[in-house]
Amino acid sequence: MSVVIDTECCIVGGGPAGMMAGYLFARAGVKTLVLEKHGDFLRDFRGDTVHPSTLEIMYELGLAEGLLKRPHQKIERLGGNFGDTHLRIGDFTRIKAHYPFIVLMPQWDFLDFLSDEAKKLPSFSLAMNTEATGLIEENGRVVGVRAKGPEGEIGIRAKLTIGADGRHSTVREASGLKVLDIGAPIDVFWFRVDRDPNQGEDVLFNAAAGRIVVTINRGDYWQCAYVIAKDEAPKIRAAGLDAFRRSVIDAVPWLAPHIDQIASFDDVKLLTVTVDRLEKWSRPGLVMIGDSAHAMSPVGGIGINLAIQDAVAAANLLAGRLASGTLTDADLERVRVRRLWPTRIIQFVQVQAHRLILTPLLKDKERAPKPPLPIRIISAIPWLQRRFASWVGLGVRPEHVHSPRA
């Protein structure tokens, strides 16, 4: 390696978990370097939903009002269309939070904001266009990361390495940590069409016979997720673009004026859905968080917020000890102990949503969809709508910032 860099904490991945961990560890006075393999944060499949749990963390850090100055849309209530039937399934307005709503904000805007704030901290560094290629190990302990940057190969030596490089994690692969594959019966086609201001303001979930389309309001366009059965993408492509367009507008008729903007299947990206988690989240010198530790289904839009909760927990448990020089390898297991229970609960609920809601809706391609029983029950009882909103918005075991500030 032509260049060797020494730091205290090296974080691989500039997504929500990595950037939040980078901010919090640097805020505690830890010399922190975040590696992001791309030159910007513009990714097709990064989630847009910033939940009340994340807004609460930003409030505790004094960053919420600055974040909300960025362009965004608010969701105070969740609804779904099942054919001609509209049901409300979530009401955020009465949950116990400073910001009782979901914010729809492209994740690159969220990450740009967090990056700008982190760069104000003297202990923080961000290396863009720098991709981790492996781990540096000595006597069975991870002591840093091998990476490739604009100037060539780099070695980063660190007292603590954090893997936060997503579901296709290079760090996870290099670590040898075992993965428990839970499985997912769906994939998602991802595309966009222009948005008219008077169309479908508050409807995210749209179902027709054998079709499900999620519509995310991004201001002047809709970001759309077309849910399909696992491995069905080749069959849909073979049926042709016109058939795909018709299928979309069967579920969401108000997209029809702009559906021709899907000019080819090059405009329709495939997101392969996985649900898994590591059996162990750490090795001596290394801890995994976010999608690197547990890949989530897009159901509920919870992934980004769960990843941020992991980062807060990791900083609460480790940053002060790392700053004071008292961190031990035994401390790293505490992150998994803290975060495993909420991860297991959320993944269980997502798997049940696949089994009881999405799969039945996708299978019946002949009849107009009947709202599944769990949805009908929630929509009929306002108290359950609030409880559902609290579970989605605040999560299971929400974290609060307790890490020190230097």
Image: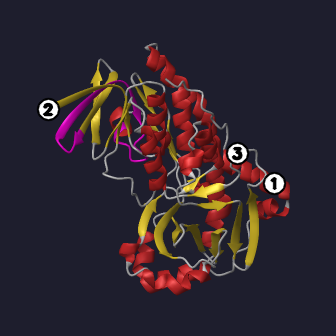
Compared to 121, does 92 lie above or below? below
Q: CA distance from mark 2 to mark 3?
A: 49 Å
User: Which one is in front in this view, the residue at disc 1 or the one at disc 2?
Assistant: 2
Element at label 1: helix
Q: Residue at x 75, y 61 (%)?
A: 89
Front residue of this view, candidates 146 and 337: 146
Return the residue at label 3. 98
Question: Residue 311 at x, y = what percent?
Answer: 51, 36
Q: Which residue is mark 2?
A: 2
First in residue order: circle 2 vs circle 3: 2
Q: Give x and y (percent) for residue 74.
A: 64, 60
Callouts 2 and 3 close, C-beta under 8 Å: no
Disc 1 to disc 2: CB gap under 8 Å: no
* Callouts 3 and 1 close, C-beta under 8 Å: no
N-terminal of the pair, mark 1 or mark 2, is: 2
Tell me, for residue 384, which label it has, or none.
1
Q: Quadrant of the N terminus?
A: top left
Left or right: 300 in relation to 129: right
Question: Which label lies toward us, 3 or 1?
Answer: 3
Instruction: In the rendered view, tell whether residue 153 sits above or below residue 357.
Output: above
Q: Nearer the viewer, residue 245 or 184?
A: 245
> Which residue is at a point 30% across and 51% down the rendered structure image?
39
Q: Report the amino acid beneath label 3.
A: His
Which amino acid lies under the numbered mark 1 shown in the image of this protein?
Answer: Leu
- Badge 1: residue crowd in 10 Å (few <14, some 14–19, many ≥20): some
* N-term-proximal mark, 3 vs 1: 3
